[in-house]
Every structure is written in structure tokens, then in C-alpha cells.
Amino acid sequence: MKNVSMQCAGLVAGFDCRAGMELSCQQGLLWVTDGEGDLLLRGGERLRLSGRQRVVIQALQPSQFRLTSPVSAWLDALLCQLLVGGRRLRRQLGHKYDVRLTGQQT
């Protein structure tokens, strides 16, 4: 995941992207050029990228955006579930076991 802040209008950034990556504009106004053409993204809007391609992003006003790969979003969700599940398991076992890969009794 890449968080990018463009503090001045007119700044340009280019990224090599994979299929399924998502560009989300958190604030500002972005001019996006990808393999399918040009479009504008305003704060709160998202674009799912298709295919491997070079994406060029220009801030038309001070802007912030995030570029996320589908794998990183999936891993973030998985790690969150593992952490929550581990805490729940420790509560259910009454702290009798050290919940690690070894499963040794404490």
C-alpha cells in the first residue's frame, strides 16, 4: 500500500500497477491517465485498475491518494482475523496455554 500526499497542484507521479490494484482519492482532485484513457478522481472516489499498466497521476489541487494491491488488503484482513481469533482463543482457554505455534502449557 502506498499513501501519497501531493501538497501542490501540478505535481505528477507515475506508478507501475498490477491488475486489481485500487487507486482511492482521499482528498483533492486527481487527473489519472491509465491504459484506458484519462479521468478525474475527486475525494472519496476510487478506481479499480485492470491489467498490468503504467498509471500517471497529476494533482489538480493539493491532494492525497492511496494505491492498494488486492493482496495487501487481503493480508490486512487475514492478520486482523488472526489477532482477534488468537485473543478469543486465549480467553476461552482461560490462559492455561501459551497460544503459540508450540502450544506449550504454561
Image: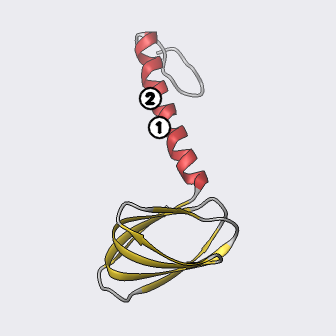
Q: Are marks 1 and 2 in contact (CB under 8 Å)?
A: yes
In front here: 24 or 84? 24
Residue 21 visible in image: yes
Residue 95 visible in image: no
In front here: 72 or 24? 24
> Going by the picture, which residue comes out furthest to the bottom?
10
Q: Give residue 21's position: percent from left, percent from top.
A: 58, 61
Residue at (48, 25) in percent of width and height: 85
- For residue 51, what is the image quadrant? bottom right
Q: Which mark is residue 44?
A: none
Q: Secondary structure at mark 1?
A: helix
Q: Which mark is residue 80?
A: 1
Residue at (38, 81) in percent of width and height: 59
Residue at (36, 83) in percent of width and height: 60
Instruction: State the count of labels.
Output: 2
The answer to whether residue 24 is left or right of residue 63 is: right
- The residue at which mark 2 appears reads as 84
* Number of residues whose C-alpha sits closer than 10 Å to that of mark 2, classed few (under 14), some (14–19) or many (20 or more): few
* Number of residues whose C-alpha sits closer than 10 Å to that of mark 1, classed few (under 14), some (14–19) or many (20 or more): few
> Going by the picture, which residue comes out furthest to the right?
51
Q: In the image, is residue 43 above or below residue 32?
A: above
